[in-house]
Amino acid sequence: MRFGFKKSQTAFQTGWKNLVAIGKEGSRQHFQVLIQKEVNLAIEKYCHSELKKEVGGVLVGREKGNEAIEILGAVEAKYAEHQAASLTFTHQSWDYIHQVMESKYSGLKIVGWFHTHPGYGIFLSSYDIFIHENFFSLPYQVALVIDPCQEQRGIFAWKNKKIEKLSHYWTGGTTEKVEPIELDAEEFKV
């Protein structure tokens, strides 16, 4: 199945409904990213919880060949080292992430990561690129960056072994049941 969606396509054709493009919808991208609506809302709320330091975590879902991923959950990088302009996943963070993956998301994969750039805009710093190249190097893994201060967001994907910003990603409903989002405090859950 190809994922060059148009808003007029039905849930029957894609398994998703009420798709909305986040970003500037342009020509067909080499790679499509779909984020379940409730997951997207929970990530947004979590990212707006801290405006002075970076926060983040991993994106959970499944790959759809080399053309798309579906993001159906997220896990906070609990125990990460948070700075004004960097986020470091610690061993304790990875232990927590893997524990949550086993208990709540068996059958799904880590399909990328997300983090904030509070007040800095949407880009991948050299440190972000290092993280992506060394910990999220599979062809389907993406990086979602959110600037909660400037209300900007963007997503980056692999293309020909390089990281490239996509013009947009999709959010909407899916016809399958989605597990709860694992973003630490109850206040961050939708």
Image: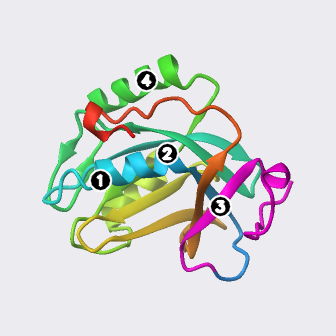
Residue 186: say if magenta: no
Q: Mark 4 and mark 3: span between their CA atoms? A: 28 Å
Helix, strand or loop under label 3 = strand
Marked residue nearer the N-terminal end (3 or 2): 3
Give the residues in magenta.
1-25
In terms of depth relative to the viewer, which is nearer, 80 or 178? 178
- Which residue in the structure is indicated by mark 1? 47
Q: Residue at x 16, y 56 (%)?
A: 53
Residue that mark 2 sits on: 38
Check disc 2 and give the amino acid type. Answer: Glu
Residue at x-position 43% and y-position 23%: 100
Q: Nearer the viewer, mark 3 or mark 1?
A: 3
Q: Which mark is residue 100?
A: 4
Q: Could you give the CA–CA distance between mark 4 and mark 2, rounded to whole angstroms?
A: 18 Å
| Contact (Cβ within 8 Å) of mark 4 with mark 1 | no
**Residue 4, percent from left and from top:** 78, 67
Q: Residues within 10 Å of mark 4 (few under 14, many from 20)?
A: some
In this rendering, the answer to whether 151 lies above or below 97 is below
* Disc 3 packing (10 Å; few <14; some 14–19; many ≥20): many
> Where does label 3 land, which residue?
19
Q: Amino acid at mark 4?
A: Val
Q: Earlier in the sequence, mark 2 or mark 1?
A: 2
